[in-house]
């Protein structure tokens, strides 16, 4: 079974992801400098095999919402991302998870 350490790690991961999601949601129609690295960090969490399923769902929803609210001005706003950060966003938004 899962030990105490694993439960604590999962709890800390949920908190980290919640904070990162809040950062991304804090500017729904803008891209402040902290948003691209936050999305890149979220992407790493979502692809971690040990990530609780709720974490993956939260990451996918946040990134999908971000893409949807920024679609009108995406041509300009994507310039604020590095290539790696854009790939991280696309990976989460287009990925299908299988249980």
Image: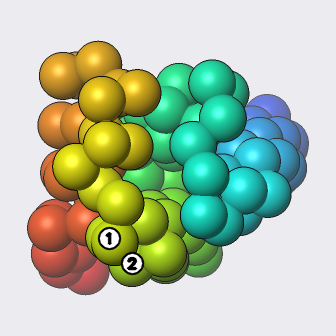
Q: Residues within 10 Å of mark 2 (few under 14, many from 20)?
A: few
Q: Is residue 41 visible?
A: no
At which x and y percent is residue 23?
76, 47
- Which residue is nearer to you in this view: 31 or 73? 73
Classify residue 67 by image quadrant.
bottom left
- Which residue is nearer to you in this view: 59 or 13? 59
Whether residue 10 sits left or right of residue 42 in the image: it is right
Classify residue 76 by image quadrant.
top left
At which x and y percent is residue 56?
47, 65
Circle on res. 61: none
Q: Residues within 10 Å of mark 1 (few under 14, many from 20)?
A: few
Residue matched to label 1 = 71
Q: Check the picture and name the quadrant holding the N terminus.
A: bottom right
Classify residue 55 by image quadrant.
bottom right
- Dot 1 and dot 2 residues touching (CB under 8 Å): yes
Relative to 69, residue 35 above or below:
above
Residue matched to label 2 = 68
**Picture colour scheme:** rainbow
- Residue at horizontal 30 percent and vertical 56 percent from the top: 74
Relative to 91, residue 84 above or below:
above
As measured in the structure, the alpha-carbon distance from the residue carrying label 1 to the one carrying label 2 is: 5 Å
């Amino acid at each position: 079974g899962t030990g105490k350490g694993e439960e604590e790690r999962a709890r800390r991961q949920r908190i980290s992801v919640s904070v990162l999601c809040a950062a991304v949601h804090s500017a729904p129609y803008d891209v402040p400098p902290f948003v691209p690295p936050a999305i890149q960090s979220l992407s790493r969490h979502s692809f971690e095999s040990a990530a609780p399923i709720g974490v993956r769902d939260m990451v996918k929803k946040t990134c999908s919402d971000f893409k949807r609210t920024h679609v009108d001005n995406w041509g300009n706003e994507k310039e604020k991302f590095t290539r790696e950060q854009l790939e991280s966003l696309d990976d989460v938004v287009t990925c299908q998870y299988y249980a």
